[in-house]
Image (spheres, rainbow, N blue to C red):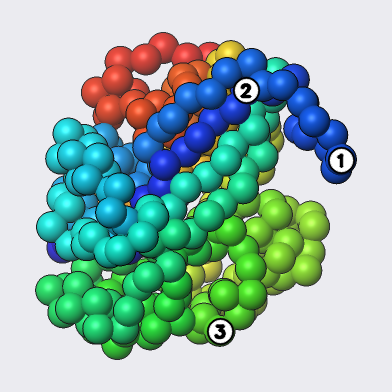
């Protein structure tokens, strides 16, 4: 079974600020740091650090050689990444004194995916292989339909949730990884239990993972519901928390671990990630997660 992540690669420009800037306000930042990111790249690194051989597909711009080097350094197979003319994707991230963030995304080369490229990449995969998707590249409906037609298991983190997802057949998704905001956008509900109820009624064969920030996470499928709280750490940068969780959840699936064990390891890895600056760079290895002593 092979794992493909078809997703974004971004340069993250992180500005440390006292508070999120208001309309019409001009404000000094404390510092500027540049990191490798993009939900796609973050999740590929999380998979690799969790011990999963992962291939990444996506587009970088003329400034994108550093992404290929970074993938190689972090155990991500970059065979299917292509360079195109123009700029790579990037984000402008405000990081406030409480370690909360606000993110402005520029798609750049991440929006240069073509149907021919999708066909080329997915042609190397077959029934039972796993495809991980976020919503930071274009042609999402076509990618989902093509992968489903090949019998791949599709794991979707619908972030950022926008109108691009309206054309996607969500009935073809095997695993949803969503936070409360995305859950509300999909279902119209605000209470976690109602979000899960509605999603399971619409997608009865799917696995639903609903992350709840400081309240932990709830997992549900047609056979069970499981909950996991957070591990207590001093948060520094929450940017890659959800991406770390995603990578470690898929790793646990592949290892066929019990769901409670998967959720506990995911929560621990995510806590370790938020205790460090950066996105992809902050994600711990599986050995580090096993060795860490954290309070739940």
Q: Are marks 3 and 1 in contact (CB under 8 Å)?
A: no
Q: In the rendered image of this protein, does residue 96 appear above or below residue 206? A: above
Lower sequence index among marks 2 and 1: 2
How much space separates mark 2 and mark 3, taking CA atoms? 36 Å
Q: Residues within 10 Å of mark 1 (few under 14, many from 20)?
A: few
Residue at image mark 2: 16
Q: Residues within 10 Å of mark 3 (few under 14, many from 20)?
A: few
Residue 6 appears in the picture as rendered: yes
Question: From the viewer's perspective, is 231 left or right of 185?
Answer: left
Q: Quadrant of residue 49?
A: top left
Residue at image mark 3: 167
Residue at image mark 1: 24
Q: Nearer the viewer, residue 241 or 39?
A: 39
Local SS, label 2? strand
* Marks 2, 3: nearer the viewer: 2
Q: Are marks 2 and 3 in contact (CB under 8 Å)?
A: no
Q: Nearer the viewer, residue 30 or 290?
A: 30
Q: Residue at x 51, y 83 (%)?
A: 169
* Marks 3, 1: nearer the viewer: 1
Q: Residue at x 43, y 53 (%)?
A: 89
Lower sequence index among marks 2 and 3: 2
How much space separates mark 3 and mark 1, taking CA atoms? 35 Å
Residue 246 appears in the picture as rendered: no
Q: Residues within 10 Å of mark 2 (few under 14, many from 20)?
A: many
Q: Position of residue 187 (x, y in %)?
A: 71, 70
Q: Position of residue 219 (x, y in %)?
A: 54, 52
């Amino acid at each position: 079974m092979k794992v493909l992540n078809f997703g974004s690669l971004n340069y993250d420009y992180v500005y440390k600020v006292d508070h999120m800037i208001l309309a019409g306000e001009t404000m000094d930042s404390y510092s500027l740091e540049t990191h490798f990111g993009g939900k796609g790249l973050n999740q590929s690194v999380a998979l690799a650090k969790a011990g999963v051989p992962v291939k990444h597909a996506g587009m970088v711009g003329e400034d994108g050689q550093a992404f290929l080097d970074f993938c190689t350094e972090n155990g991500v197979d970059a065979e299917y990444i292509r360079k195109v003319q123009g700029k790579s994707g990037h984000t402008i991230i405000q990081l406030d004194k409480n370690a909360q963030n606000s993110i402005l995304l520029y798609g750049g080369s991440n929006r240069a995916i073509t149907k021919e490229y999708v066909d080329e990449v997915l042609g190397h995969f077959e029934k039972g292989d796993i495809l991980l998707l976020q919503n930071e590249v274009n042609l999402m409906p076509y990618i989902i339909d093509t992968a489903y037609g090949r019998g791949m298991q599709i794991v979707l983190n619908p972030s950022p949730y926008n109108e691009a997802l309206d054309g996607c057949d969500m009935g073809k998704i095997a695993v949803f990884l969503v936070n409360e905001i995305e859950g509300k956008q999909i279902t119209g509900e605000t209470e976690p239990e109602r979000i899960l109820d509605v999603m399971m009624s619409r997608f009865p064969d799917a696995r639903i993972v609903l992350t709840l920030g400081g309240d932990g996470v709830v997992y549900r499928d047609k056979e069970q519901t499981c909950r996991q709280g957070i591990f207590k750490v001093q948060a520094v940068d929450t940017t890659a928390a959800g991406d770390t969780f995603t990578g470690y959840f898929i790793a646990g699936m592949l290892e066929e671990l019990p769901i409670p064990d998967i959720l506990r390891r995911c929560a621990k890895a995510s806590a370790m990630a938020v205790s460090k600056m950066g996105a992809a760079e902050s994600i711990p290895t599986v050995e580090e997660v096993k060795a860490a002593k954290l309070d739940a």
